[in-house]
Image: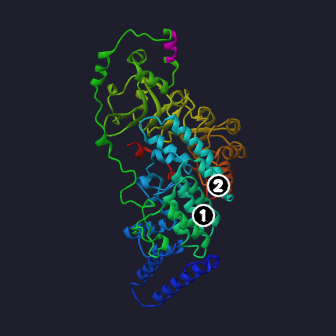
């Protein structure tokens, strides 16, 4: 029997009878020495599904015969979804405007393959924060304050929803707080499909559809309920009454009840979205969307400029606001009047990166790897991302201010500690990747880790090179307060002296990511000259710690030149390939 005996025993007598008939057909087909018996079994299940709500085990059995996500598989998934069954691994099939809003975020393989859209950030799911970070690094202008507010609300709501799963009433009320009907429907129907015997969820859902006057949708749910609970005459009467009041609707069933007949019904599955053939989030290339920057715009800017302006506020106050305004206020002032930009010509750039063309789009600037100096605006104000700036040091004197949250500097850059402080001194950096840079202080020595971390209270992803760890470092780190949790730390070519390993581990434990199902990766590579006995002790300690939580924690300690460096793989890395 394909269906588990435990589930079968819970079914009503009438449903057991129809299952017995289906299983008997399947056994007879499989006895035959027929090359097409697999397809005949699937046909038997398909014919059954035209009359009765069909369980997930049968849909999974149908899919065994076909390649994942080919045309036939997609049709089976489409049919299974109508029958309230969904394997979360199928969620990547539902693309475009039809993607599913589950508390489990859709995956299409490696995180690099997932295109994050703004709509992914408006409902609670297990990867909401990671999606926000990837979205921030992809867009060309700052996300709205409303989006950040919504994300914060949904991130706070997600663990409550997960914790309340055992209490159906509370769980359902929390789903309602999302204020997203599709999110509620997708998650309730997913739950029903995983356990069709959960009558309480069925009835709470049916009552909700009544209370919200979603009668057409309600009739479809009634039709499914009555084709699983075949002996529930009371619900069938309730369904009949609702059909007479709010029908007709199109239904795909062949065994229509008397009160369902005569309504011009034909096979239709438009009650649910279906997997689409088009690629999710298809976008045209930058080359098609963007035009090279027209430098004559700068010359034309002052053609209509008025030197003398009358403001309601006194002049000194206006100038004070200009000098101290953040980038959002400053941008609004620039949009309101050219006078403000003339007084403080600081072009605001959300994303600064290198690419094949020199392009401005929204608030983002793309330069060629070795652009001429005159291509770089003076007094530029960086507010979001800075990726792969090959001539960064040459351009630093032209920066007005840097408040970038995501910084990635390519290899072979010599970076002084003062220059690094200029980039990260605002304290808002979330991701810092200078793993391939040569970082030195004013004495041309490696910088102590704690001196760098002082400027990174919001860091989540960190990659450093040529860093010093000393006896003072662990205590200094554990005394710091971080606003975010780390999900990845890579430190390469560590120099210095032995330190308190237990205190250092405490720093990692307190500040590592602790969200459900989110992994923590940490890789330390020491210089060959570092005390070898100490490194072995640290290796053993970190290995023991990783073993306690193997699924979600990886901490490796190596020595330069003899490690099997597998630390470069990244489940949610935004590197140069993301920014090109």
**Split into 4 quadrants, where in the image is the N terminus?**
bottom right
Image quadrant in which you'd find residue 335: top left
Is residue 319 on the magenta stretch?
yes
Residue ID at (59%, 59%): 205
Comparing 324 with 117, the one in front is 117
Q: Residue furthest bottom?
A: 32
Give residue 444's position: percent from left, percent from top. 54, 30
Q: How crowded is mark 2: few (under 14 residues within 10 Å), some or many (20 or more)?
A: some
Q: Is 187 located above or below residue 383 in the figure?
A: below
Dominant SS in magenta: helix
**Split into 4 quadrants, where in the image is the C terminus?**
top left
Image quadrant in which you'd find residue 485: top right
Give residue 298's position: percent from left, percent from top. 31, 22
| Rendered image coloring scheme | rainbow
The numbered disc on residue 171 is 2
Residue ID at (55%, 65%): 241
Residue ID at (56%, 56%): 209
Q: Earlier in the sequence, mark 2 or mark 1?
A: 2
Is residue 265 on the magenta stretch?
no
Q: Is 40 located above or below residue 105 in the figure?
A: below
The answer to whether any part of residue 503 appears in the image is yes
Residue ID at (44%, 91%): 32
Magenta stretch, residue numbers: 316-321
The numbered disc on residue 250 is none
Answer yes or no: do the residues labelled 2 and 1 have beta carbons within 8 Å?
Answer: no
Tell me how far mark 2 sits from mark 1, CA to CA: 14 Å
SS at badge 2: helix
Label 1 sits on residue = 202
């Amino acid at each position: 029997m394909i269906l588990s005996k435990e589930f079968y025993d819970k079914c009503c007598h009438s449903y057991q009878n129809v299952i017995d008939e289906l299983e008997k057909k399947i056994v007879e087909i499989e006895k035959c020495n027929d090359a097409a018996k697999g397809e005949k079994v699937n046909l038997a299940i398909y014919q059954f599904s035209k009359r009765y709500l069909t369980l997930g085990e049968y849909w999974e059995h149908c899919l065994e015969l076909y390649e994942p996500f080919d045309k036939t598989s997609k049709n089976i998934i489409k049919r299974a979804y109508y029958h309230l069954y969904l394997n979360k691994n199928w969620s990547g099939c539902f693309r475009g405007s039809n993607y599913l809003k589950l508390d489990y975020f859709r995956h299409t393989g490696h995180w690099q393959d997932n295109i994050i859209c703004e709509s992914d950030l408006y409902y609670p799911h297990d990867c909401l924060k990671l999606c926000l970070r990837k979205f921030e690094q992809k867009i060309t202008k700052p996300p709205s304050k409303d989006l950040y507010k919504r994300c914060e609300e949904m991130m706070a709501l997600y663990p409550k929803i997960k914790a309340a799963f055992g209490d159906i009433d509370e769980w359902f009320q929390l789903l309602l707080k999302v204020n997203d009907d599709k999110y509620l429907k997708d998650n309730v129907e997913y739950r029903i499909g995983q356990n069709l015997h959960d009558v309480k969820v069925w009835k709470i859902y049916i009552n909700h559809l009544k209370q919200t006057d979603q009668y057409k949708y309600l009739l479809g749910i009634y039709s499914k309920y009555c084709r699983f609970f075949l002996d529930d005459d009371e619900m069938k009467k309730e369904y009949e009454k609702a059909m007479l009041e709010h029908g007709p609707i199109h239904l795909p069933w062949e065994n229509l009840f008397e009160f369902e007949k005569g309504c011009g019904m034909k096979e239709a599955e438009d009650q649910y979205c279906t997997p689409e053939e088009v690629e999710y989030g298809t976008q045209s290339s930058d080359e098609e969307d963007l035009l090279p920057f027209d430098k004559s715009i700068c010359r034309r800017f002052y053609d209509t400029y008025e030197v003398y302006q009358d403001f309601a506020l006194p002049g000194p106050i206006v100038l004070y606001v200009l000098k101290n305004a953040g980038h959002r206020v400053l941008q609004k002032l620039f949009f309101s009047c050219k006078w403000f930009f003339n007084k403080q010509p600081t072009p605001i750039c959300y994303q600064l990166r290198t690419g094949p063309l020199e392009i401005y789009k929204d608030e983002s600037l793309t330069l060629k790897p070795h652009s001429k100096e005159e291509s770089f605006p003076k007094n530029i104000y960086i507010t979001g991302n800075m990726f792969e700036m090959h001539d960064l040091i040459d351009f630093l004197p032209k920066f007005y201010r840097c408040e970038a949250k995501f910084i990635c500097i390519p290899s072979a850059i010599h970076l002084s500690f003062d220059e690094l402080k200029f980039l990260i001194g605002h304290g808002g950096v979330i991701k810092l990747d200078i793993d391939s840079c040569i970082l030195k202080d004013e004495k041309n020595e490696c910088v102590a880790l704690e001196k760098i971390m002082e400027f990174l209270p919001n860091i989540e992803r960190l990659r450093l090179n040529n860093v010093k760890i000393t006896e003072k470092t662990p205590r200094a780190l554990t005394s710091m307060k971080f606003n975010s949790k780390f999900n990845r730390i890579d430190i390469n070519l560590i120099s210095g002296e032995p330190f308190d390993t237990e205190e250092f581990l405490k720093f990692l434990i307190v500040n590592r990511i602790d969200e459900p199902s989110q992994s923590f990766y940490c890789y330390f590579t020491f210089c060959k000259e570092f005390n070898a006995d100490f490194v072995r002790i640290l290796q053993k300690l970190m290995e023991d710690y990783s073993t306690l939580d193997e699924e979600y924690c990886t901490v490796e300690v190596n020595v330069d030149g003899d490690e099997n460096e597998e630390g470069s793989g990244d489940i949610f890395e935004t590197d140069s390939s993301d920014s090109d």
